Amino acid sequence: MLQYHHCRSLESVVYGKVEADIKYSDPDFKSAYSWLEKEVGFYPLFLAVGTDEEDIRMTGYQNQWRRLLSEGPDGKKYRELGESPNNVLFSFENVDGVFMDYDCWHLVLNAGHKNYQMTDYEKKLIFKPSWSTSDWLRKAKRNHHSVQLVTPSLYLTNAERIGVRNRQTKALLTSMGFNGVETKRLILEKA
């Protein structure tokens, strides 16, 4: 059963091992990711955990089809024709890493005002150190979009299923040697 999902841009796909790299991180989250690195001992690659489409949405894979980028006082900003990203979704049966409660991850994302000094209680909420793998997978099954896993690296070639946005990308990844490549679109949520 495919339970671990990772999305990345086509440009960053290699046939083999990828490692987390701070230069590819969203600038708004680098401080939170650096805090996490100190806690788990490695810079994180994030994976969504679960078997439902709602869990896969945690990866952001569906956003490559989004036309409306933002809405504000200056009006709506739309993606221009040809500006769409080309992202690839890698799904795995097993991945080693550290589970985290996605519902509590906001505690870290919003901790800049206190220089990312997290209390022991907050850390327990996020990492739930007494939980086993089966506890985490049970939470993911019962509460979709609630569990993430971080790992220092992934062997993309170990993915059992790979979702791509179009036939050209499928042909490219197949020519690179990847198996299980399929064109997969996720419907956007209604605003």
Image: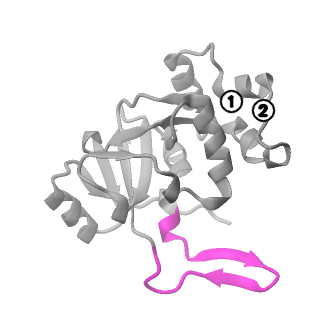
Which x, y percent locates residue 117?
A: 79, 35
Which x, y percent locates residue 115?
A: 80, 43
Residue underneath mark 2? 118
- For the residue marked with disc 1, what is the amino acid? Ile
Q: Which residue occupies 82% across, 82% down?
A: 73
Which x, y percent locates residue 21?
A: 47, 50
Q: Residue furthest right?
A: 113
Q: Which mark is residue 126?
A: 1
Answer with left or right where residue 119 lies relative to residue 14.
Answer: right
Which is nearer the N-term, disc 1 or disc 2? 2
Q: Which mark is residue 48?
A: none
Asked which secondary structure carries label 1, the reply is helix
Q: Nearer the viewer, residue 67 or 84?
A: 84
- Res. 74 image quadrant: bottom right
Tell me where the magenta segment starts and ends, as one range.
Answer: 63-84
Q: Which residue occupies 72% across, 27% down?
A: 123
- The quadrant in which the N terminus is found is top left
- For the residue marked with disc 2, what is the amino acid? Met
* Label 1 to label 2: alpha-carbon separation: 10 Å
Marks 1 and 2 close (CB-CB < 8 Å): yes
- Image height check: is 51 above or below 53? above
Which x, y percent locates residue 49?
A: 50, 36
- Is 14 inside the magenta-drawn segment? no
Total numbered badges shown on the rendered structure:
2
Q: Which residue occupies 31% across, 51% down?
A: 162
- Image height check: is 101 above or below 189? above
Few, some or many C-alpha atoms within 10 Å of disc 1 (few <14, some 14-19, many ≥20)? many
Q: Which residue occupies 70% across, 82% down?
A: 76
